[in-house]
Amino acid sequence: MPTGIGQTKTVTAPKFHYRKASWANDGHTLVVRASESDRPLRFWVQDTAGGSPRAVTPEGVDGLFATVNHSDYVCARDATGKVQLYPIDGGNPKLVAGVSDSDRVVGGSPSAEILYLTPDIAAIPLQVLKLNIRTGLRQPFVSVWPADPAGIAGLSPPIFTADEKRYVYTQIRVFSVLYIATGLK
């Protein structure tokens, strides 16, 4: 749907089951997480002007769309558990060194060779590290913790601005009320 003047456009493909879509940096290509018929999920690119989707990752390889140093990738663990950057414009994936088995990649820096990752996605506060994809150097970046931690049960991975000065995240709060009854028979 256009955010201004324009027509609504439907992007589909026969026998495709779409789960999620993100805009690539070119502004007319979608990076979609989808499955074809009853096949396993994978990432695809699809031009909004038409045409069939083109696979980016192998079947069953799931991850997230990320822009790293002005290039669009799908960042995912391959069948062996190694983190790879799959370029959405084609080509061979790039192995990312310095990611442990417990790390989860949560984003990328659009202007630097940096991936953001967390060693424990369930931790509160959520620790986010920077990983240089060229050197494998890891460094602490930010600790995500709400100003009011009352009832916090979980935090979503943050999304950072290009200048890394701000971020946004979702928090899950659980509140309950405890009633005490005395003298019941």
Image: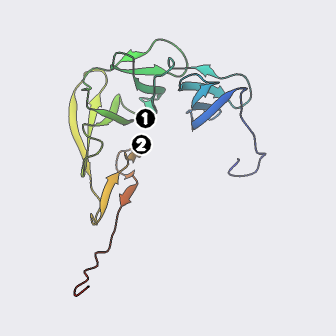
**Residue furthest out toward the top:** 92
Q: Which residue is mark 2?
A: 162
As drawn, is 30 to the left or to the right of 120?
right
Residue for point 63% across, 32% down = 17
**Residue furthest out toward the bottom:** 183
As drawn, is 131 to the left or to the right of 64?
left
* Secondary structure of residue under mark 2: loop
Where residue 110 appears, as percent x and y from the top left, is: 43, 35
Residue for point 32% across, 34% down = 104
Q: The C terminus is located in which quarter?
A: bottom left
Q: What numbered label is drawn on residue 110?
A: 1
Tell me which colouring the rendered structure shows: rainbow
User: How many residues crowd around disc 1 within 10 Å: few (fewer than 14), some, or many (20 or more)?
Assistant: many
Q: Are marks 1 and 2 in contact (CB under 8 Å)?
A: yes
* Secondary structure of residue under mark 1: loop
Where residue 179 appears, as percent x and y from the top left, is: 28, 79
Residue 170, compared with residue 147, is above or below; it is: above
User: How many residues crowd around disc 2 within 10 Å: few (fewer than 14), some, or many (20 or more)?
Assistant: few
Q: Quadrant of residue 121?
A: top left
Asked whether 136 or 19 is in front, the reply is 19
- Rounded to the nearest whole Å, what is the CA distance between mark 1 and mark 2? 6 Å
Where residue 120 appears, as percent x and y from the top left, is: 25, 40
Q: Amino acid at mark 1?
A: Pro
Residue for point 28% across, 30% down = 131
